[in-house]
Amino acid sequence: MTMERRSFLKLMGAGAGLGAASLMTGCAGLGMEGPTGGRRVVVVGGGYGGTIAAKYIRMMDKSIEVVLVERNDHFVSCPFSNLYIGGLMKDLSPLTINYDKLAANHGIKFVQAEVTGVDAGAKLVRTSRGDIRYDRLVLSPGIDFRTEEIKGYNLATTPDVMPHAWKAGPQTVLLRKQLEAMPAGGTVVMSIPLAPFRCPPGPYERASMIAMYLKQHKPKSKIVVLDANPDIVSKKGLFLKGWKKHYEGIIDYRPAKKVTEIDAAKKTVLIEGLEDVRGDVVNVIPPQRAGAIAVAAGLIGPDKNWCPVNPTTFESTLRKDIHVIGDACVAGAMPKSGYSANSEAKSCATNIVNAMNGRELVDMSGINTCYSYLSAKEAVSVTGVYLVDKAKNAIVAAPGSVAVSPDLSELEAIYAESWLKNILTEMSS
Amino acid sequence: MKISRFKWALSAAALAMSASAFAAPPTPAMISNACAGCHGTNGASAGPSMPSLAGHNKESIVTAMKKFKSGERPGTVMGRLAKGYSDADFVAMADFFSKQKFHATSQALDAAKVARGKSLEEESCSRCHMESGKEGKDDSPIMASQWLPYLEIQMNQYLSGHRKMPEKMAEKVKPLSKQDLDALLHFYASVK
C-alpha cells in the first residue's frame, strides 16, 4: 500500500469528526491543534487569493480538508473601491462578499479568527481562537504598511485623519466622507509610494475618480498627486489622455515627490524635508510590504518586503510547506493585482493537490486583466498571460500578451463591471 | 509495487519544491482555470456582458480564439490575451470548456419578445444554431442561456460591420428587422 493510500484511509476514518467542524464557535478553542490525518491545508486570508486557493483545492480533491481562516466575516474588494470614492456607487455592497456559500458549496471550514503567529516547526497556525495544525499552509495576507518610513505617521491614529483607503472598507468610506465634507475650492492631496505596491494603476485611477467627483460637486477644487516614482507607473499614456480630456486644471500631477514626513494635525505632508504641501483632504498611501503574518512567519526575502516563492507551487523558498500567494509574494512579472492573486491561487492549489497525491507538478498558466476607470463611463485595461520560464525559474509574461487598451473605452467599462461580478462570484460561491 | 523513475521524480519534487524543474507543462485545466476570473468558474459566467463558455462546442472556441488573435474578431482584452497562447492552447481550452456542464442563466426577459423570437428562430437561425441554440453546427457558438447584454453587444458589432458576419448568417439576418433580431436574442437568452 502506498503512503498516499494510508493517509487517505486515515482521513476517511476521521471523516465523522470533521463533519462537526461547522460547530467551531464558542470558547473551548477550535480543537484543531492535534494530529491532522495528513491532509489538512490551512488557508489564511479570505481575499482574492485565499478564497480561490481554498475553493480549488476542494474542487480538485474532496479528500483534502481545507480550513479558511479570516479575521472578518466578510471581504470588501479593493478593485472598484475607487468608483465608490468617486461617487459612482451609493455603498460598498457591490464590492462585498461573505463566505457562507463558499464554505457550504465546497465543504470548506471557515474560521473567523485573528492569526497571531505561525510555528513552522510544529506546523501550527496560532489564532485568537486557538491553534490549528496544518500539513500545508497557504498565506494570502495581502499587504501591510511600512509606516516607519514616514516620520510622524502613527498607524493607530494617522489613518483616521489621513485615510490611506488602500485596504477597502471603513477607510474607503472615510475618504469619501472627507471629500463630501470638503468645501468647494479645496485641495485634495494624495501621495503614491515607490513601486512595487498593491495595484500599480490603482493610485492613478483614484486620482481620476477623485477629480471626477471634484469636477461635479466641488467647483474650483483640485487634487495634487505626489508620486514618489519618477513617472506614472502603469497605463501612463491612457491616464494622461483621460486627464487631459476630462480633468485639465483639476489634477496637478507631480512626479518624483516622495512623502517622508507628515503632520496629521496640520494636514500637511513633507517631501524629503524640502517642501510641504497642505490639503483639506489628505490621502497618504504609505509604502508597502507583505502582510504582517508573512513577516512574522519569517517569509520575507532579501528585499525585506516581499515573500520569495517557487513559481510553480508558490511554496516559500524560505519555509517548507508554507505557500504565499497574492500581493505578498514575489510572482516574477505578474503585477500585484486581484486577478494575479486569482491565477496564483489556482496554480498553488493545483500543485498542493498534486503534491499531496504524489502526482507530477504542473506549471502555471496565469492571466492578469486589470481595469481602471477614467470617468463614469470610460475604462482602460492592461492584460497579460503568464508562464514559468524554466531557465530563469521565474514567472514571465507570454510574448505579445502584455498590452494596454488602444484608447479610453465605454465598452471596457461595461466589461469591467462583468469582470467584478464574475470574480467576486467565483470567490464567494 | 513498482517504483518508476517518474514516481521517484514526483516524490523528489514534492519534497523539494524549491525548483520547478520537475513540473509538467500547463494542463488544459490549468490554462482554462485562469479564464474564470472573467468567464466564471468552469466557464459559467455570472457577468452579463461576458459569455459563458461552459458546454460550448470545441470548434467555436478555437475559431473565436484564433480570430481574436488575428484581429479578425474585434475585442477589447481578448485580442491582447489571445496573443499569449498557441493554437494548441486554444484546443486545450476548447476541450476543457466543452466538457463543462451547460450553464443555465436566470434573466429578466420580455415574454412577448421571447415568444416572437421563438416563432422566428427555426426559419432564421436553427440550421447553424441548432436545438434552440444549445448546439452549434461546425464553429457556430452556443447561444442558449447566454446573457442578453452579451448577445446585444455582439449583434451590435455585427450590424455596425465591426465584427464580420459569416455569409450564411448575413443572408438570414438581411430580411430581419431590428425588432426581429431583438426578439431572437431574447429567445436565445431564455433557453435553459
Image: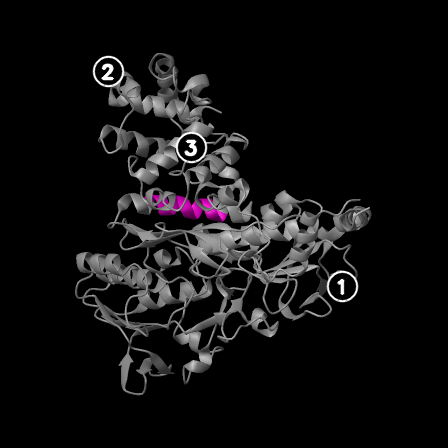
Residue A110, relative to residue A293: is it above or below? above
Whether pointer 1 and pointer 2 mark residues with C-beta atoms closer than 8 Å, the reply is: no
Q: Which residue is mark 1?
A: A33
Residue A54, how many percent across, how many down? 61, 52
Q: How many marks?
A: 3
Residue contact between numbered discs 2 and 3, judged by CB atoms under 8 Å: no
Question: Can residue A177 be seen from the camera position used here?
Answer: yes
Residue at position x 43%, y 64% in the image: A198
**Which callout, 2 or 3, points at the residue further toward the start of the chain?**
3
Q: Amino acid at mark 1?
A: Glu
Residue drawn 56% across the image and 61% down it: A310
Whole-percent x and y of residue B2? 77, 45
B102 left or right of A202 in image: right
Tell me the residue at 40%/28% (across/down).
B109
Name the kind of residue labelled 3 in the image: Ile
**Chain of the residue that carries numbered disc 2 in the rendered image:** B
Residue beneath label 3, please? B61
Q: Chain of mark 3?
A: B
Q: Position of residue A4 (x, y in %)?
A: 76, 49
